[in-house]
Amino acid sequence: MILSPSDKIYVAGHRGLVGSAILRKLEKEGCENFVLRTSSELDLREQKDVRAFFEQEKPHYVFLAAAHVGGIHANSTYPADFIRDNLLIQTNIIDAAYKAGSKKLLFLGSSCIYPKFAPQPMPEDALLTSELEATNEWYAIAKIAGLKMCAAYRRQYGFNAISAMPTNLYGPKDNFDLETSHVIPALIRKVHEAKVSGASEVTVWGTGTPTREFLHVDDLADACIHLIRNYEEEQWINVGTGKEIPIGDLARLIIDVVGFSGDMVFDTTKPDGTPRKVLDVTKINKLGWESTTPLRKGLEETYQWFCKNHESHGRRF
């Protein structure tokens, strides 16, 4: 059985949004032999240190969830950081896992790898068919390199590396820093602070018309376990809900969940990003997996986590 209690498992990025969800799911599955390192214990950008870690621990299974991530503002402000850090992290881990004899590696990409005007819903074979969205091209190029590296190592060395392309994620342990966060945590924080301060309105970036697909991180974790057990192909595979919502409607839903009674205004001087983005999830659905968390329920859980952690531990996001 793949992923038995005795299998040694390394989750890269186990304290982050995705990595922590994967770890929770693995524990529920009965796995208990983990080798974990925080970023202060192991800098994944340092090749020598990553190689030494893999040579010492020799994990059987690797979940590559570590990444330098952020929203439109962060990608536009720190392009060098995004392309450099992600290339280093994924290159070091994929190569070290192969050389250490890991049985299987799951690399997590992002739906932003697809072209700006890709067919909708976006199928896996839309990759590299036209230009990328300029607001996140640095991160996207790094992630494309990662999934291609997995494919190359499988083709040349027979290394069992697979790649999953999740859609926009959200959930507990998300990043709520307004400078670097994605749309859902940014809106939750902005609406919450508007409610607490008694503001009369809250501002949403862009026109509110672009549509996005959102997947609860616990659903992604479930998909990752399913894929590590059931997927063996070179081509990357999409992971999402297959459902989309306009940003304006998302903001209204968050306003309702938070309980803010003021108005919503759109700042149309800010960029919208890709006009439409929803994944074609036919492939993973045929493999026997579908998402199960309704958006509203997921938003309620995320907001509850935010409220519990925002001030109670002296923490500022």
Image: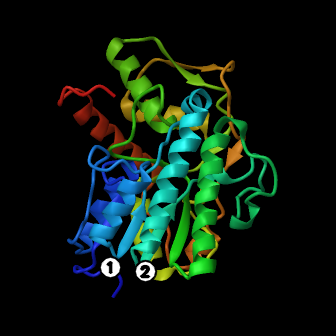
Q: Is residue 272 left or right of residue 190?
A: right
Type of amino acid at the residue the image marks with label 1: Leu
Number of numbered discs overlaid on the protein picture: 2
Give x and y (percent) for residue 286: 58, 79
Who's the residue at 21% across and 72% down the image? 33
- In primary-sequence order, the first of circles 2 and 1 is 1
Q: Say which mark, if any, is on residue 3.
A: 1
Who's the residue at 77% across and 53% down the image? 118
Q: As rendered, which of 299 and 144 lies closer to the eye?
A: 144
Q: Residue 237, can we see it?
A: no
Q: Say which mark, if any, is on residue 229.
A: 2
Q: As rendered, which of 242 and 71 lies closer to the eye?
A: 71
Name the quarter where the N terminus is drawn. Answer: bottom left
Give x and y (percent) for residue 160: 50, 79
Classify mark 2: helix, strand or loop. helix
Residues tagged 2 and 1 counted as in contact (Cβ below 8 A) = yes
Give x and y (percent) for residue 138: 64, 41
Classify mark 1: helix, strand or loop. loop
Residue 276 found in image quarter:
top right
